Amino acid sequence: MSQQLPGAHATKILQEADRLMTVCNSCRYCEGLCAVFPAMEMRRSFSDGDLNYLANLCHACGACYTDCQFSPPHEFNVNVPRTLAIARAESWAAYAWPSALSGLFARNGLVVSIICALSIAAFIYGFVAFRDPRILLGVHTGPGAFYELMPHGAMAGLFGAAFLYAILALAMGLRAFWRDIGEPAGTLTDPPSLWQAMKEAGQLRYLDGGGIGCVNEDEHPTDRRKIYHHLTFYGFLLCFASTSVATLYHYLLAREAPYAWWDLPVVLGTFGGIGLLIGPVGLFGQKFKRDAALVDEKRAGMDTAFTLMLLLTSITGLALLFWRDTAAMGPLLALHLGVVFALFVTLPYGKFVHGLYRFAALVRYARERRMMGHGT
Ligand code: SF4
Ligand code: SF4
């Protein structure tokens, strides 16, 4: 746990978060809205790690801003959602591994756009340069059709390396977060806490403003943001499952892609792709309606970049499925692989990390509650 003087913080936003949490700890009007306020009430003072923990526990539902009698124009100027959103984003940059790449969080939209464009261009160049150039616009069908453009070994090696790098960088970031909040490593392997956190993350339990819905654009709460987030999250998981099953098919059953429309990898990928289409489009719609007072406007590019990358993954994947037996297959494969590769390598430096740190914060919260003798 970080050693620091009470009330002294590393950044201005943590100073402001401390001020707000101190006001809220006296008021406690919002204690039934989410996990943040009960976790706050377990403390009398707040270290940097405590505030980063609370910031990552917040689901940005906006209810505590709408309900607050001290929100602007009141002189107390209490805006918990926005303050915690900024603190949260600054914490992600501080935990980034390697730390030299923490700046990628600041100009994330631009960085992701450039990496995505370069990645697509590299796949097109690779298809043309290392195989017969005419192959890019040729018609290839049947098992192994994709590998006429890029050998399976090269594809698996490239994406395996990108995936392993992303896992390593995310794990190192999580380690830094865990150390910062002063939690013992054993909590992350505590089955009751893990199970409780999985249920709460799987339901997005705290994105409901205490049961009334998400306060997004005005004072009328709805569940739309939660529904679109569910479609995005479960769509992503289904697409990941599709790729995993296809890998098992290849290595265990010696069956090469592309597969028939009724085969498990295609069924999982199609449902996942539809979720990843509707979810991000819905989230974009909600984003543009969101009350500007709740938003960390400096990170709008990062939010947009991540949602757009998920949407592009889905669009290019579904387009590849529909037109894989035509001459469009080569360019579509380059587009899809380029987008997915860029998504993988930028995962540790963008909005994706919110899921990791929020889940970890929920694990800690579950353990704290049990230690305090509270139920679920
Ligand atoms: S956000 Fe406002 S109403 Fe809610 S606990 Fe804090 S000070 Fe009280
Ligand atoms: S925005 Fe929602 S989740 Fe975040 S602290 Fe306020 S009520 Fe809790």
Image: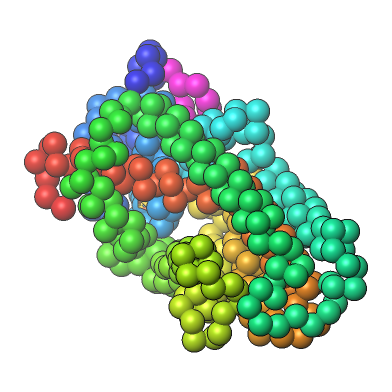
Q: Nearer the viewer, residue 239 or 141?
A: 141
Q: Nearer the viewer, residue 186 or 27?
A: 186
Give left or right: position of 248 versus 128.
left
Residue 137 at what x, y percent from top left?
85, 77
Residue 93 at what x, y percent from top left?
57, 35
* Magenta part, dominant SS: helix
> Who's the residue at 54% across and 38% down the image?
169
Q: Which residues are magenta?
A: 8-17
- Residue 229: tell me if it is visible: no
> Who's the residue at 79% across and 82% down the image?
139
Relative height, residue 257 to residue 63 (above, below):
below
Q: Nearer the viewer, residue 278 or 242?
A: 242
- Residue 266: tell me if it is visible: yes
Relative height, residue 243 to residue 342 (above, below):
below
Q: Find residue 306 and report its image quarter.
A: bottom right
Which image quarter is the N terminus in?
top left
> Who's the residue at 74% across and 50% down the image?
115
